[in-house]
Amino acid sequence: MQNINTYDFKGKRAIVRVDFNVPLNADFQVTDNTRIRAAVPSLKKVLEQGGSLILMSHLGRPKKAEDKFSLRHIISEIEKQLEVPVLFAPDCMGKEAARMAANLKPGQILLLENLRFYAEEEGKPRNLAEDASEEEKKTAKAAIKESQKKFTATLASYADCYINDAFGTAHRAHASTTLIAAHFPNDKMFGFLMENEIRAIDKVLKSPEHPMTAILGGAKVSSKIAIIEHLLNKVDNIIIGGGMSFTFIKAGGGNIGDSLCEDDQMTLALEILRKAKEKGVKIYITEDVIAADAFDNNANTRICPVDRIPDGWMGMDAGPRTLETWEKMIMNSKTILWNGPVGVFEMPAFASGTLHLAEFVARATAKGSFSLVGGGDSVAAITQMGYADKVSYVSTGGGAMLEYLEGKVLPGIQAIRE
Ligand code: AMP
């Protein structure tokens, strides 16, 4: 397997799958350039070594070519970060893109237009009639898979080597994230961002220092069940907080008032508790909550035990006793994995639990523990709380990180490794 550190880029054209799916405001200005900045080390490496760059990404979820999803809006932001002018191919396919790629000189950058302007990128048929028969669906699927091969080969024809630095889409088997790798059997590699993400998650999943604690919060149990099951084989402790606690508490016979609950997940919740006991994994569910009489920042609040929440009230944040238990747990852990807020942190009145948790994790990290935060809303929470640079690693790949934590093999990673 090639390595971006040791590969000789001199005179080579590198096609790089980046994740430039950045938020834009109404004037099409980039409002958060984190993802562009995250790709800079890999891109600079190629340029400094005398190579040239062909950048490819998706932006949003277009169903056809549409200006509001055009990557041309982010050219100036890339230029600002790399301090090099960026050439733009207004179509990622066609003669113009091929010509521009062929003419690239060392040190130059070519950005291709949004890959998802073509259905071939994702390899799923578009514009299928709602009442299409199974046969029609099958034919359309086969047709797009066929044209996807040509699409992928065309992208590959632009370059001498392939770098995947888009961890955020590593769980998708798309043309630019997975299929293209086969065209570069000896010249494919991860970018620095991808390498760092994989290293951080592998450190937690494959060689953690014990005791290890996973903190799982967020709204729903259903989206975290697979992760909990996988982690039961790895961790010593699991903290379960946020909206998903209540499904466990109700399943155990507690009164949760009007708190969030997934009744259809209660059997599974009990099953998890049973398995955890069997495996000797300790589970720490919310003990007391800050309950509110409405899902509103200005609602009346009271502190009550999690299994005695009155009707008409709902658990919105972790209470003081819970935080005391969690603090001890976290301060005693050598490895910490955190996914999901433990309260409705978007409302200031119910952000305190998540804020305290961020502080505990930061303190444990300062004491020498390894902490990985990521997936879904966790990154927004830790950034909003101002603790992003006080933990060991903040993963940028929401869905990809969650699938990795479930123990799934991510196609984007496998394509480079195999
Ligand atoms: P997730 O995307 O699964 O990480 O869930 C994040 C969401 O869970 C955030 O929008 C939180 O507001 C929400 N959440 C956390 N705790 C609660 C709670 N006690 N009740 C309702 N929603 C919650």
Image (tube, rainbow, N blue to C red):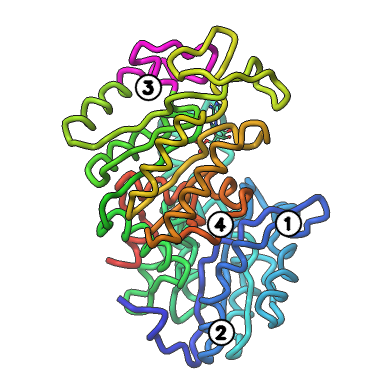
Q: Amino acid at mark 1?
A: Thr
* Magenta stretch holds residue 258: yes
Q: Tell me if label 4 and label 1 are in contact, CB under 8 Å.
A: no
Q: Which residues are magenta?
A: 246-267
- How far apart, in angstroms, are the residues tagged by discs 2 and 3? 54 Å
**Label 1, residues with CA under 10 Å away: few <14, some 14-19, many ≥20:** few
In-image side of 229 versus 301 (left or right): left
Tell me the element at label 4: helix
Mark 2 lies on residue: 52
* Residue linked to disc 4: 388
Q: Earlier in the sequence, mark 2 or mark 4?
A: 2
Q: Mark 4 to mark 3: distance in Å?
A: 30 Å
Along the line of sight, which residue is nearer the eye, 267 or 67? 267
Position above or below: 265 against 56: above
Work out how far the residue at label 1 is from the one at label 3, CA to CA, in angstroms.
39 Å
Q: Residue at x 75, y 55 (%)?
A: 67
Write down the residue under mark 3. 248
Q: Nearer the viewer, mark 2 or mark 3?
A: 3
Q: Answer whether labels 1 and 3 touch (C-beta < 8 Å).
A: no
Specify whether residue 348 is in view: yes
Q: Nearer the viewer, mark 4 or mark 1?
A: 4
Distance from label 1 to label 2 (Cα)?
Answer: 27 Å
Which residue shows up at 41% across the image and 15% down it? 263
- Whether residues under marks 4 and 3 lie with C-beta atoms below 8 angstroms apart, the answer is no
Quadrant of the image where one finds ligand 1: top right
What element does badge 2 sit on? Answer: strand
N-term mark: 4 or 1: 1
Q: Which residue is mark 1?
A: 31
